[in-house]
Image (cartoon, rainbow, N blue to C red):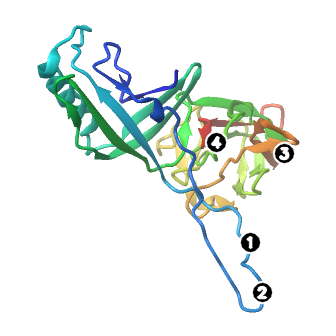
């Protein structure tokens, strides 16, 4: 049965101190942030693509019981203790919390805030109460738990990033590493046409590191994913050129495309180009899959 846990604590408590109601089992799909542009002399409005998604909220209905953590009936007094424990879990305001969604082998997680908690609807005689917590997902998208790394060619068209297959949302926080030799290395997201490139060269053994979320780049002479400048790592952020949707705020959105007549086939395709490459030249993308 689908369930959630918050910061590692099950919202379907193993001893049934509290449990989710049946109507809060599936996270909602995000809406689209609408933009309307009309011009005189033209019917309707101008078509606009690439619109962002709206922040989503997830109402979590919880039934709180009078059972003890050992699974025994503790009556109304235990109900009070359980309500206090749940209030402590839902009362975090100073940081984002991790909400994990589980349905069999499917696991998704999102960074969330608790924006409201209802007054408990208490039935004293039955030692039960109902509470609804409103969870907000500021970043909209749900993610895989584990970050994976894909390796491809530094000079090939429409390569499938196999580790990101199955995504339904854009990946805007990928780490990209290009290993030289390579001159004018460029990476293109096939679905949107967005690009990130550096009009310069990499020698054999040099690596170009690109943090798409932070909009930072470094050149390293060692095998590392750390962009922090040091003896072997040089900041080259100012030499990066990025184009495409959202490139002013995030470099290279990796967007999954649906295969022809097959919505179950969803893959991220990238085209990489560079000159003066050898068999040692390669691209690596480190990221987590993204879901609506």
Residue 69 point in image, percent of width and height:
24, 13
Q: Tag 1, which secondary structure?
A: loop
Q: Earlier in the sequence, mark 4 or mark 3?
A: 4
Q: Is residue 229 above or below residue 67?
A: below
Q: How many residues crowd around disc 1 within 10 Å: few (fewer than 14), some, or many (20 or more)?
A: few
Which residue has dot 1 on it?
Answer: 47
Which residue has dot 4 on it?
Answer: 176
Cα separation, mark 2 vs mark 3, equals: 50 Å
Q: How many residues crowd around disc 4 within 10 Å: few (fewer than 14), some, or many (20 or more)?
A: many
Q: Is residue 144 above or below residue 181?
A: above
* Image marks 2 and 3: residues in contact by CB distance under 8 Å: no
Q: Tag 2, which secondary structure?
A: loop
Residue 255 point in image, percent of width and height:
70, 48
Cα separation, mark 1 vs mark 3, equals: 42 Å
Q: Is residue 16 left or right of residue 50?
A: left
Cα separation, mark 4 vs mark 3, equals: 20 Å
Q: Is residue 142 above or below residue 75?
A: below
Q: Residue at x 31, y 13 (%)?
A: 15
Q: Nearer the viewer, mark 4 or mark 3?
A: 4
Residue 256 point in image, percent of width and height:
72, 44
Cα separation, mark 4 vs mark 1, equals: 32 Å
Q: Residue at x 64, y 62 (%)?
A: 51
Q: Is residue 56 visible?
A: yes
Q: Is residue 156 visible?
A: no
Q: Nearer the viewer, mark 2 or mark 3?
A: 2
Which residue has dot 2 on it?
Answer: 42
Q: Tag 3, which secondary structure?
A: loop
Q: Earlier in the sequence, mark 2 or mark 3?
A: 2
Which residue has dot 3 on it?
Answer: 276
């Amino acid at each position: 049965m689908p369930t959630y846990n918050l910061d590692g604590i099950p919202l379907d408590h193993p001893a049934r101190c509290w449990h989710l109601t049946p109507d809060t089992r599936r996270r909602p799909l995000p809406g689209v942030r609408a933009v309307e542009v009309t011009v005189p002399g033209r019917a309707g409005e101008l078509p606009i693509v690439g619109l962002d998604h709206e922040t989503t909220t997830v109402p979590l209905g919880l039934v709180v019981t009078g059972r003890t953590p050992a699974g025994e009936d503790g009556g109304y007094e235990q109900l009070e203790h359980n309500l206090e424990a749940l209030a402590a879990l839902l009362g975090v305001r100073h940081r984002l919390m991790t909400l994990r969604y589980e349905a069999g082998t499917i696991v998704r997680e999102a960074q969330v805030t608790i924006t409201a908690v209802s007054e408990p609807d208490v039935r004293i005689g039955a030692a039960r109460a109902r509470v609804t917590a409103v969870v907000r997902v500021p970043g909209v998208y749900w993610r895989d738990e584990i970050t994976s790394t894909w390796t491809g060619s530094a000079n090939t068209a429409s390569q499938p990033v196999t580790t990101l297959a199955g995504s339904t949302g854009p990946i805007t926080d990928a780490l990209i590493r290009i290993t030289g030799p390579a001159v004018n290395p460029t990476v293109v997201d096939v679905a949107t046409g967005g690009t990130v490139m550096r009009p310069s060269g990499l020698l054999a053994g040099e690596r170009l590191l690109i943090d798409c979320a932070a909009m930072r780049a470094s050149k390293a002479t060692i095998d590392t994913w750390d962009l922090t400048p040091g003896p072997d790592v040089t900041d080259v952020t100012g030499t990066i050129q990025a184009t495409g949707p959202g490139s002013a705020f995030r470099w290279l959105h990796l967007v999954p495309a649906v295969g022809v007549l097959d919505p179950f086939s969803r893959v991220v395709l990238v085209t990489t180009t560079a000159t003066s490459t050898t068999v040692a030249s390669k691209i690596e993308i480190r990221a987590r899959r993204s879901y609506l």
